Every structure is written in C-alpha cells, then in structure tokens.
Image (tube, rainbow, N blue to C red):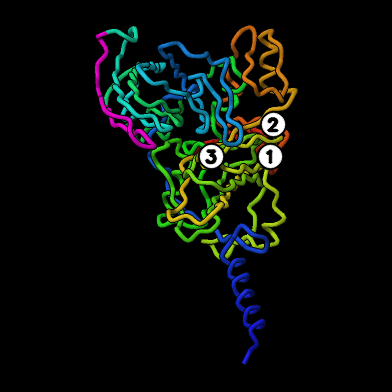
Amino acid sequence: MSSPPLVVGRICGCFFSALLLGSPGVFGAELLFQRVPAQARRTVPENLARYSLGAQIEVSPQSNSILGVRLSSKTEDNNTAVAALLCDDPTVGYPLPTGTSAAVISFPNIENIDSISFSTGNAKGDVTVATSSAKLPADSPQWREVWQGQIDGDVFNAKIGPTEAKYVRLTFNLKQSGRITGFGIFSTPAVSDLNRARPERVNLRSENAALTVRSLTNFRGRARVLYVTSGDDLAQANNIIDNHPATIFSFAMNDGSPGAIIDLGKVTSVRRISAVYARRPGRMDFYVLQSLPGTETGSQALLIDGPGLARMIPAGSVESDGSGRAAADFPVTAGRYLMVKWTPAAHEETPFSIAEVAAFGGIETPSLIAANIRRTGSPALSSEETDGKDFDGKDFDGKDFVEGKDFGEAKEAPAEAPGEGPNPPLPAPPPFQFIPVVGPVSP
C-alpha cells in the first residue's frame, strides 16, 4: 500500500500533466489546425460605406473632421472623428451622444442597397433610416423613410432593401450613449459583382485614415482563411474577413487556445493587425509568417508542435481587458500568412468567437505616401507619426492604395520564375524560283 505522501505526489503529478495537455497556450503544448474547405468565392455583400469606393460621411451636429482620425491602440479607442467609420479598421469607432444626431452617407453613384449593420457599443435608443437619390439637407422632409426601429444589443443589423439610393441618412435618438464600430451599408449581393472592378476613389488628407482605408484581409480580394483550430462549420470561417460585424465564426467549446491562419494570397508588407471578438479577458497574439508553420498532416490538418510554437515570435500581442477588440502596430513585416491566437484568462462557459480580423500595409520613410505628397508640394510625414496630424496642401489621389498594390512589394516579394521568353523567329522562306510549265503542243 502506498504511503500518503506518494499518493499525494501522484495526484499532483496527474493534475499537472492534465493541465499541460489541456492548455494549448502553455509551453510544451501544441496547436492542431483544421483546414477550411476549399470553395468557390462566395457572393458576399459589398460594404459600400468605404472611402476606397468613394463614400463620404457628414454628421450633424458637426464632429471633428477626417484630419482628427486617431487609430486605436491595443484595446483603447479615443477617436472622435466620424471619418473613421468609413475605414476598414473594425476597432476604431465613433461616439454617439445621447439625444438626437444624424449622419448622411453619400456614394459616387446610385447603388442598390440591401442592409445596414454596425456594432453598437452599448448604445440604446431609436434609429430611423432614410434614402434619397438627390442631395438634400439633413432636415429636409423629402427624404424617403425606409426603416425605423430600436438599437438594443451588441450588433445593429437592419434590412432596408433592396432599394436604390445615392444618399443614406441615419437619425439617432439615443437614451444611452455608445460607440459604433464596424459600420457598413451593404449592397444587394449579385454574382456579377465578383467580376466587377470598382475604381479606387481615395482622397484623404489624414495619414491614419489613409493607412487603414483598405484591409489586406478583404475577402473580396485574394485573402481567405486557410486553417482554424476548431469549429462546428468550418466553411463559415471566412466570416472572419468578410467586413461584416454581424457575421461571426465560433470555435468549439473545448478549444483552449482558439486560432486561425489567413492566407493573404501573396507576400505583403504588414504593419498593423486588428481584431474584434467576443468580450472577455485574455491575450490575443498576432503573427506575420513568410510560410506556413508546422507540419501538414495529410491534406486536412496542420500541426504546430510545442517547440515550434515556442520558437514563434508574435509581431504583436495585446492583453485584452474584456472590451472585445485588439489592435497591434509593429515595424513593417513582410509575410504571406497571418496567424491569430487567443489565450483566455479563465475558463468560459460559452465558445470563443471572432467577428473580424483586418491587416494593413506599412510604409517607412521614404514612403509611397511621402513621395506622392512631395509631388503635390506638401511636406512628407515620418513613418512614426500616428497621431492623426493632417497633410497640408493638396489632397492626394490615392493611386497607391489600389487593391493589389502593397507597400514595399517590389522589395519584399520573391522574384518571379523566369518566363519562357519570346517565341523563336520563323525560319527564313526558301528562295523563290519561277519554273515555267510548257503544255503539250498539238501537231
């Protein structure tokens, strides 16, 4: 019969071993990813409320201009400029005060609109949505009301169409203030939209807004989610990058360290990653990788063992306070794959979920933006300047922000394999010789 100290030692040893095996975030643990099923590009609604598509926004009473856009840092969000709502960063919001206020969003052309969605940030009250195809004052009675209801919950999602409009007015009457993020006005999805290239119309005078105007993880581009650690429906994993806050991806309840790997489609320069997820304390780690980590086990799984995981250094880590958002800025890093990994602070009774992950390209002096500004006669800004200071002088035209053009790509991207070269020339024609043919002569 074992002595009491030996029994206690065995119990403690078993408990410690179980802790190591059941906690993927601790040293010596491993991560096993499941491959997201390959599928044709989905017909997802396009978010029309984006500066990259030419949208503009005005609020009443007047708020700070686009020159005051401030990016979120870690879990904080101190932005007060409404212009941030039209950028792709889901962690930067705009405060809605109590009482009555209105926002008017305009598009370059008349669009077929289907729905409106945004995260409410605990705001409560009423909202009225009206549309118009002609420019009207915010208080004009000629606006056509298409929806009226309440804001009550974490996410506001209203179907207002299909309806055609060039201007959309949202009138808020709040009894409890809040901060809206992930703002979107979505078009009626159509298969033809997948092959339609919209012109870039960026015309911003704020470096902060310009750098977050086009997410590298836009699902309508080349990016897609390759692997997740768990989930009941893996085909829904691309909800993480669909630019829609109302669509989420939930991991399994027993997943102790949920994570996802996103393929950007090519080697790209990255300087900022942000994410919106379930509100709970813990740590979010962001990785930028040149190649897939770990070992592929068959065609449906990817294993990162304990030593391999310990050697991986995140580009940024954020200790979350339960706000449900994290943003990390870091030196420009080149990579094709992004990995996000969540480590909970305590056991939760509900599964962890992610609404959005966005990544943004980086610039360093001399930069594309600085070069463009010099061409317009304005001073360049330092790459460390992230406090929302504006550019003086003329606006730039945003040509460097066209989808598919990445900062530093000429330096970071691997050299392409040599092509076949021009076709060999045709052989010279043979010399022409005339040979007369003499027919038979009759007697």
**Disc 2 marks which residue?**
408
> Horizontal and vertical percent for residue 112?
32, 25
Nearest to the observer: residue 329 or residue 221: 329
From the viewer's perspective, tell me whether residue 366 is left or right of residue 52.
right
Comparing 49 with 158, the one in front is 158
Separation of residues labelled 1 and 3 (CA atoms): 19 Å
Q: Residue 274: where, in percent of width, then height?
A: 56, 37
Q: Main secondary structure of the magenta part?
A: strand
Q: Is residue 419 visible?
A: no
The kind of residue on which mark 3 rests is: Ala
* Magenta extent: 141-162
Dot 3 alpha-carbon crowd within 10 angstroms: few under 14, some 14 to 19, many 20 or more = many
Provide the residue designation for mark 3.
275
Q: Which residue is mark 1?
A: 334
Q: Counting residues from the N terminus, which is met first, the one under dot 2 or under dot 1?
A: 1
Residue 428 lies left or right of residue 441; in this view the side is right
Q: Residue 430, how many percent across, how many down?
A: 66, 37
Q: Is mark 2 in CB contact (under 8 Å) with mark 1?
A: yes
Residue drawn at (28%, 31%), measured in percent from left and top?
159
